[in-house]
Image (tube, rainbow, N blue to C red):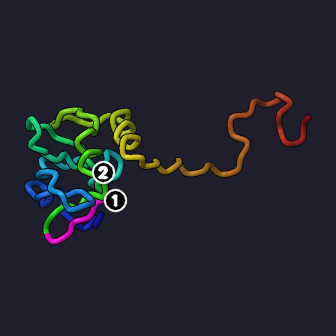
Amino acid sequence: MQTDIDPRNLIGRKAFDRSGHRIGTVDEVYLDDATGVPEWAAIRTGLFSRDAFVPLEPSELVEGALRVPFDRSLIKEAPDFGVGRHLSPEQELQLYHHYGLDLAPPPALPDHDFGKLAGSGSGPDEP
């Protein structure tokens, strides 16, 4: 998603699935706790006034509407955590799995022998 878009400007925009079917309207935008980058949008689907969470990373803003690269049925089946509350890391993980998105692995640590006990026999010079 374009990172120069103000998340407040997404609220109220229409949202469409990958086939161009209307999903609903962006109700809320959730920012990543660590980076402050918009990460999730809650789409008011109109189905029992339910909001469905969609990831913003593979989505894009096209001609003033949010285009989400998933089928409407998958979006409407997304876990419902209610809006207006913080998404926990576990809830985000459930959403990533629901959409089949892989989380980036944590950055590799430098190649050091951190965490080894002195004299444990497991150092590089010991058997």
Q: Which residue was labeled with disc 2? A: 55
- In magenta, the rendered stretch is 57-63
Residue 46 in the figure: left or right of residue 86? left
The image shows residue 37, relative to residue 84, as above or below, that is below
Indicate whether 57 appears above or below 46: below
Identify the element where label 2 is drawn.
Answer: strand
Residue drawn at x 19%, y 34% is 85
Q: Report the amino acid beneath label 1.
A: Pro
Q: Quadrant of residue 96?
A: top left
Q: Position of residue 74 (x, y in %)?
A: 29, 45
Q: Residues within 10 Å of mark 1 (few under 14, many from 20)?
A: some
Give left or right: position of 39 versus 9. right
The residue sitting at 16% across, 47% down in the picture is: 43
The reply to whether residue 36 is in sight is no
At x 19%, y 45%, the residue is 42
The answer to whether residue 34 of the structure is visible from this angle is yes
Report, in whole angstroms, how far the alpha carbon at label 1 lies from the one at label 2. Answer: 7 Å
Q: Which mark is residue 58?
A: 1
